[in-house]
């Protein structure tokens, strides 16, 4: 005959283990003592776990005492009821990270009963129970949390952006080397080839200044409208005649840092993107609209080794035919409705 586990969790009202925020969870905690014992308490708690390709972390969202001190007798079945409301934070399954919910139930024994259990395990040569006593006194069940409804709250003004610096790193270093040779060594060392690269580098700096001047002419305000759309107001404060077109979109990225090995490993993955919208011709005041994610992705999230961030991507093409790119983060707050109504 198979021995029953000492503690079991029976989520009787929801066998699929899928809840909406604000719902009620009803569960039975069943105890089958294998020896007469006295417990100090039986406690249940809801635990939010962040796991994946990173160091796992857990936070207790709710903890409640289910039963006070009492004596449990061998081979008797005890059933205790537990009920609680589901927290507001949804489950999430990304590329390299997950938000997992679990219901834990555990028993705390009084010291005398703990010694009795250990002594009986020694007499029966039950080393598994002796070495893992705490695990024998606890149980857990995973469940999923979804929102009745949610909205994204975005209010960003005048996005601070700059031209991607890596466009100009190597030209800048090259110019420093060439200038040092040109100033401190004989000019003929450079030759025509060196001068060619010197002029190219100077051209890169002019290109950078031109791009940054156009970028500084733009002001972008972002906010949500009708709770389903993201609206971007793109204002051209000056130099409008120098801008041929503007491409704009937003993406959502998941960045996970794994510090468990000798060297930290970073997983940076795009989990959502929109199609680029083009503003052409460019007016002083321009508007573009984007759909917001409909699959419950988190807003801006930063904790320990996990970062989920929204990012604005900008592409600008000047009248001279020069195209450059820039990006910046968007702060997004996700508001979850607990009751299922707006």
Image (cartoon, helix red, strand yellow):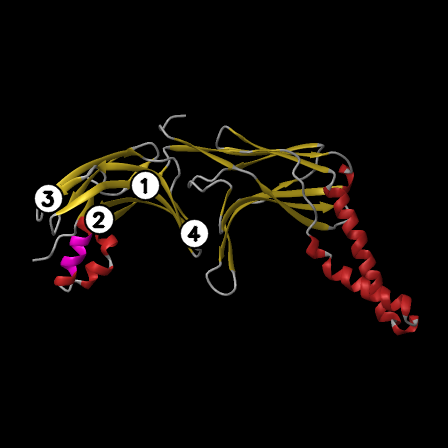
**Circle 1 sits on which residue?**
46
**Circle 3 sits on which residue?**
77
**Circle 4 sits on which residue?**
97
* Residue 119 magenta-highlighted: yes
Taking the image as shown, residue 162 lies to the left or right of residue 123, namely: right
Secondary structure of the residue carrying tag 1 is strand
Q: Quadrant of the N terminus?
A: bottom left
Residue under the image location 19 percent in, 53 percent down: 115
Taking the image as shown, residue 274 lies to the left or right of residue 61, namely: right
Q: Nearer the viewer, residue 59 or 257?
A: 59
Main secondary-structure element of the magenta-colored stretch: helix
Within 10 Å of disc 3 (Cα), the crowding (few <14, some 14-19, many 20+) is few
Secondary structure of the residue carrying tag 2 is helix
Q: Position of residue 342 (x, y in %)?
A: 41, 25
**Circle 2 sits on which residue?**
111
| Vertical relation: 132 (above or below) 68 | below
Q: CA distance from mark 4 to mark 3?
A: 39 Å
């Amino acid at each position: 005959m198979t021995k029953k586990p000492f503690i079991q969790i029976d989520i009787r009202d929801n066998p699929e283990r899928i809840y909406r925020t604000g719902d009620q969870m009803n569960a039975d905690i069943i105890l089958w003592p294998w020896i007469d014992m006295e417990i100090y308490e039986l406690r249940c708690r809801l635990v939010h776990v962040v796991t994946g390709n990173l160091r796992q972390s857990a936070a207790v969202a709710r903890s409640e005492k289910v039963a006070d001190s009492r004596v449990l007798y061998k081979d008797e079945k005890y059933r205790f009821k537990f009920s609680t409301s589901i927290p507001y934070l949804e489950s999430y399954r990304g590329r390299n990270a997950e938000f997992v919910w679990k219901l834990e139930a555990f028993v705390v024994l009084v010291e005398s009963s703990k010694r009795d259990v250990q002594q009986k395990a020694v007499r029966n040569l039950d080393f598994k129970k002796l070495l893992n006593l705490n695990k024998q006194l606890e149980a857990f069940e995973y469940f999923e949390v979804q929102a009745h409804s949610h909205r994204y709250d975005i209010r960003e003004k005048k996005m601070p952006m700059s031209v991607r610096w890596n466009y100009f790193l190597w030209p800048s270093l090259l110019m420093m080397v060439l200038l040092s040779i040109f100033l401190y060594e004989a000019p003929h060392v450079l030759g025509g080839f060196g001068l060619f690269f010197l002029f190219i580098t100077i051209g890169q700096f002019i290109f950078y200044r031109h791009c940054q001047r156009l970028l500084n002419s733009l002001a972008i305000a972002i906010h949500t409208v009708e709770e389903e759309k993201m609206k971007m107001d793109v204002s051209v404060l000056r130099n409008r005649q120098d801008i041929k077109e503007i491409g704009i979109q937003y993406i959502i990225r998941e960045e996970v840092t794994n510090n468990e090995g000798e060297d930290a490993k970073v997983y940076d993955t795009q989990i959502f993107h929109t199609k680029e919208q083009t503003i052409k011709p460019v007016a002083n005041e321009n508007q573009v609209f984007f759909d917001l994610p409909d699959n419950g992705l988190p807003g801006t999230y930063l904790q320990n080794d996990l970062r989920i961030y929204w990012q604005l991507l900008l592409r600008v093409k000047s009248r001279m035919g020069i195209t450059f790119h820039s990006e910046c983060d968007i702060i997004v707050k996700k508001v979850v409705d607990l009751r299922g109504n707006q």
